Image (cartoon, rainbow, N blue to C red):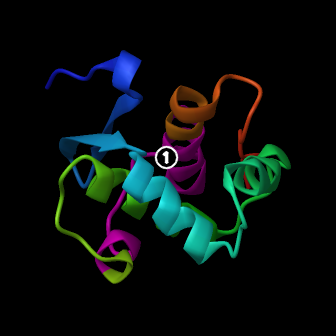
Amino acid sequence: MSVNRRRGEVEAVIDGVPRKLCLTLGALAELEDAFAADDLGALVERFATGRLSARDMIRIIGAGLRGAGEKIDDEGVAALRVEGGAAGYASVVASLLTETFGSAQGQPQNP
């Protein structure tokens, strides 16, 4: 699988399958709604704390998968497995947020 980092794409092995994730403008709008953020600045502030719940990670991974074209809802995302358990999910989220917002933003702490 080929990802384009200039477009903010990342690759992660989820459920044993290499998948592309991307926080498109539509995916970011979805996250603004999910986190009740008024704008992207508020969303960045929320992620910059580094403290994300499992539900937060489901939403972010789901938005990233949908942004890359997958047809999956958050319930489906919740059932997916990533090697490394909670730390593996956090790594996927950190990679996605780093590609989208830059290295200083939204790096979740490993639970």
Q: Which residue sits at x=65%, y=24%? A: 102
Question: Image check: 10 left or right of 39?
Answer: left
Above or below, comparing residue 34 to residue 17 in the picture = below
For the point 39% across and 63% down, which residue is it? 62
Magenta part, dominant SS: helix
Q: Nearer the viewer, residue 4 or 87?
A: 4
Could one spot residue 55 in this view of the protein? no
Residue 11 in the image, given as x and y percentages of width and height: 31, 32
- Residue 45 rendering spot, x and y as whole percentages: 82, 50
Q: Does the magenta stretch include residue 83?
A: yes
The residues colored magenta run 76-95
In the image shown, does 16 or 43 lie closer to the viewer?
43
Q: Name the residue under label 1.
A: 84
Name the residue: 73% across, 47% down: 44
Asked if residue 91 is among those painted magenta in the image, a careful observer would answer yes
| Residue sitting at the far front | 39
Q: Where is residue 109 in the image (x, y as percent from the top left)?
A: 76, 46
69 relative position to 41: left or right: left
Q: Specify the amino acid type for callout 1.
A: Gly
Quadrant of image for the C terminus: bottom right
| Structural crowding at the residue carrying mark 1, measured as other residues with C-alpha within 10 Å and reported as few (<14), some (14–19) or many (≥20) | few
Q: Is mark 1 on a helix, strand or loop?
A: loop
In this rendering, the answer to whether 33 lies above or below 65 is below
Q: In this view, does 69 lie to the left or right of 106?
A: left
Instruction: Please give left or right for residue 105 compared with residue 6 in the image.
Output: right
Measured as percent of width and height from the top left, residue 27 is found at: 42, 57
